[in-house]
Image (spheres, grey):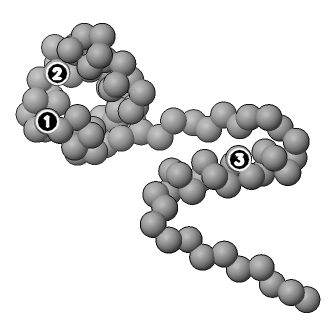
Amino acid sequence: MESNKTQVFDVQPDELVKRIAEEVALKVGVSTVELPESLLSRKQAAEFLDISLVTLHTWVKNDILRSHKVANKVYFKRSELLEDITTKG
């Protein structure tokens, strides 16, 4: 029995999940697969926007950015960050 092995280098986890989902969708015959959007931590959101954590906190407090609380932690959706800074910023 022949074994198929795949090695993955330099791929972010989100991109890997997306690629696997696309391949599975092709095999099953589904045209598109909706993946839940991953959440960014406060640090990741600040890095993504190239701002400090203090500025991030201020923008959330002033309703410039939308945030989501999960188990007493604050998270952000990348798409909402982009939308908020382009429409409100």
Please say if 69 is above or below 61.
Answer: below
**Residue 63 spot, x, y in % from top left:** 22, 13
What mark, if any, has residue 51 been given in the picture? 1
Q: Is residue 41 above or below residue 57?
A: below
Quarter residue 48 falls in? top left
Q: Residue 58, located in which quarter of the rendered image?
A: top left
Alpha carbon separation for disc pair 2 and 3: 36 Å
Residue located beneath label 3 in the image: 22
- Residue depicted at 49% across the width and 61% down the height: 11
Above or below 75: residue 20: below
Residue 33, horizontal then vertical, whole percent: 71, 37
* Marked residue nearer the N-terminal end (1 or 2): 1
Indicate which disc residue 12 carries: none
Residue located at (50% from left, 71% from top): 9
Q: CA distance from mark 3 to mark 1?
A: 33 Å
Mark sitting earlier along the chain (3/1) = 3
Left or right, residue 66 beside residue 4: left
Front tag of 2 and 3: 3
Q: Position of residue 54 (x, y in %)?
A: 8, 34
**Quadrant position of the N terminus in the picture:** bottom right
Residue beneath the point at 30% across and 35% down: 74
Taking the image as drawn, is residue 50 in sight?
A: yes
Q: Is 84 left or right of 47, judged from the image as shown?
A: right
What amino acid is found at the position of numbered circle 3 in the picture?
Answer: Glu
Where disc 2 sits, the SS reads helix
The residue to which callout 2 is attached is: 59
Query: From the viewer's perspective, is the residue at label 1 or at label 2 nearer?
Result: 1
N-terminal of the pair, mark 2 or mark 3, is: 3
